[in-house]
Image (cartoon, rainbow, N blue to C red):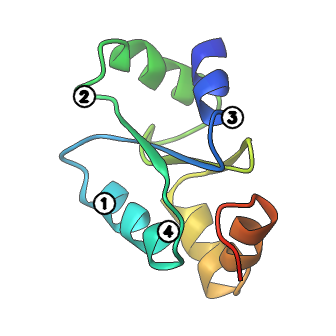
């Protein structure tokens, strides 16, 4: 779990994903559309991917991917990101995290 938290706080936006997950791709595309450049860890290709996936599940991510950290905080998965976007709060969160500038 420590590894996931450390990686999650290593950049303004961090996405844990799997290369075959279309929802993860959609979330990454949405975040990039605001001008953010997220750090992406693909668990199915990462050497410690299985341990990281287990840690994400222990942190409450169900399903384990996508898991998104913004501003060194675990925001959650696709549902949380889409909800923030629909309510117009995702952009504000990205700005506060210094992931984008206006």
- Residue 9's label in the rendered image is 3
Label 2 crowd (10 A; few <14 / some 14-19 / many >=20): some
- Whether residues under marks 4 and 2 lie with C-beta atoms below 8 angstroms apart, the answer is no
Dot 1 lies on which element? helix
Residue underneath mark 4: 31
N-term mark: 3 or 1 = 3
Quarter residue 96 falls in: bottom right
The residue located at (22%, 43%) in the rendering is: 19
N-term mark: 1 or 4 = 1
N-term mark: 1 or 2 = 1
N-term mark: 4 or 2 = 4
* Vertical arrangement, residue 12 with respect to residue 50, above or below: below
Q: Marks 1 and 4: which is nearer the front? A: 4
Q: Marks 2 and 3: which is nearer the front? A: 3
The span from disc 4 to disc 2 (Cα, nearest Å) is 21 Å
Image location of residue 40, percent across then percent down? 41, 43
- Whether residues under marks 2 and 3 lie with C-beta atoms below 8 angstroms apart, the answer is no
The span from disc 3 to disc 1 (Cα, nearest Å) is 21 Å
Q: Marks 3 and 1: which is nearer the front? A: 3
Image location of residue 68, percent across then percent down? 56, 49
Image location of residue 5, percent across then percent down? 66, 25
- Residue 44's label in the rendered image is 2
Dot 4 lies on which element? helix
């Amino acid at each position: 779990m420590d590894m996931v938290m450390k990686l999650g706080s290593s950049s303004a936006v961090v996405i844990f994903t799997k290369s075959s997950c279309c929802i993860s791709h959609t979330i990454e595309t949405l975040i990039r559309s605001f001008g953010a450049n997220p750090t992406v860890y693909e668990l199915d290709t990462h050497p410690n991917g299985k341990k990281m996936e287990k840690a994400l599940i222990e942190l409450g991510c169900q399903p384990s991917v996508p898991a998104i950290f913004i501003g060194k905080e675990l925001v959650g998965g696709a549902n949380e990101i889409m909800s923030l976007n629909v309510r117009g709060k995702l952009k504000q969160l990205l700005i506060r995290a210094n992931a984008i500038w206006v």
